[in-house]
Amino acid sequence: MTQDDDPLGVLLAARPGEDDPAPESESQDLVKLVVFALGEQRFALPGARIAEILPLVPIHPVPGCPPALEGVISVRGEITSVLCLATLLGRPAPAPATRGAILLAGAREITSGLRVERVVDVVDIAGHDILEPPPTLPSMLARVTTGVFTAKGRTVAVLDLERLFIDFMKESA
């Protein structure tokens, strides 16, 4: 696989070096976020909640599960559930994809893979640049959005992973 075949590798290579010093006041207020795409919209999850970004692998369906639970995958021999993030957000489920990524995420006692269409970037955003969510968000999205920011001219909604998991568990019971 060449670097051109690995979009995440290209993104990471284009980032400033880790040895570049950040001003002291700036480095203390930064929030690491994993930005990803679902259709044309951009979302982010706190980097501290993402254990790993996995390439899309075959997801094995489990009969009788809720629609948001796409199935399971094996991660180094451990069986891990995979949720369709679009479905959790009340959006139409994307067609089964040959490209995409799975964000291995955890909150409280829950760990699951979240299928996304594309990882866009991993960014450090100053906390004061994350604004309150606008009141115009659809109710489902407003419930799980903790803030918004602008990156590369696009609005990105920061999601509350714990709230997403809690809502999924309530709807599945």
Image (tube, rainbow, N blue to C red):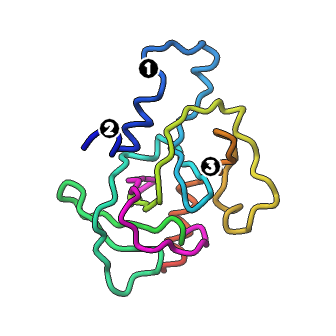
User: Residue 153: x and y, percent?
Assistant: 69, 41
Number of disc labels: 3
Mark 2 / mark 1, whichever is N-terminal: 2
Identify the residue at horizontal 68%, vertical 46% (top origin). 154
Mark toward the viewer: 3 or 2: 2
Would you call the spot at circle 2 few (<14 residues within 10 Å), some (14-19), or many (20 or more)? few
- Residue linked to disc 2: 3
- Spatial separation of the CA atoms under disc 2 and disc 1: 17 Å
Q: How many angstroms separate mark 3 from mark 2 (CA)?
A: 29 Å
Q: Which mark is residue 158?
A: 3
Q: Which amino acid does label 3 sit on?
A: Val
* Residue positioned 33% across, 52% down in the render: 54
Residue 101 within the segment the image draws in magenta: yes
Which part of the image, by quadrant, shows the N terminus? top left
Residue ID for mark 1: 17
Label located before the other in sequence (3 or 2): 2
34 or 140: nearer the eye? 34
Q: What residue type is labelled 1?
A: Gly
Q: In the figure, residue 101 lies in which quadrant? A: bottom left
Query: Which stretch appears magenta?
Result: 88-109
